[in-house]
Amino acid sequence: MAKTEQEIHEVDSIPWQPVAGYPGVYEKVLNQDPQTGSISRLLRYAPGTVFNEVLEHDFYEEIYVLSGTLIDLGKKLTLKAGYYGYRHPGMKHGPYRSPDGMMTFEIRTYQK
């Protein structure tokens, strides 16, 4: 199976949902493949969001920062609007804090 074919459309009607286990982080799922778990989403961090864990995923992760800032404390890197990244499975990142909030467009791809 694959993600659902969709013509270009507005996404204001798609609700923001809290991301389980990450207080202050919300997602707006734009498309997903229920079989593989691959997903395209907007991710929003509320101002003052902090999480202290180092993250490591089993999927490819592609992100583009749309607004705000997110500080990767481990890498001593401040992500700002216009920043882009592509992570392979197993690439460590974080812990994070977002003093003024941030929004990204993210694509997660599982290779099964």
Image (spheres, rainbow, N blue to C red):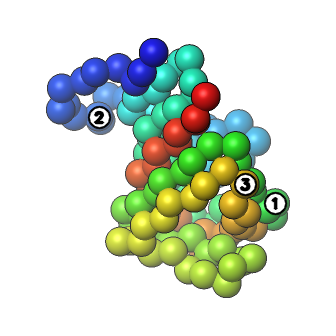
Residue 83 in the image, given as x and y percentages of width and height: 42, 72
Residue assigned mark 2: 11
Q: Is residue 56 visible?
A: yes
Q: Residues within 10 Å of mark 1 (few under 14, many from 20)?
A: few
Q: In the rendering, which numbered label is found on residue 34?
A: none
Sequence-wise, the earlier of marks 3 and 2 is 2
Q: Is residue 51 visible?
A: no
Residue 62 in the image, given as x and y percentages of width and height: 48, 54
Q: Residues within 10 Å of mark 3 (few under 14, many from 20)?
A: few
Check disc 1 and report its element: helix, strand or loop: loop
Q: In the rendering, which numbered label is found on residue 90?
A: 3
Residue 47 in the image, given as x and y percentages of width and height: 57, 64
The quarter of the picture where the N terminus appears is top left
Residue at the limit of the structure toward the right, as seen here? 53
Depth-wise, is mark 1 or mark 2 nearer the camera? 1
Between 38 and 106, the residue placed more toward the observer is 38
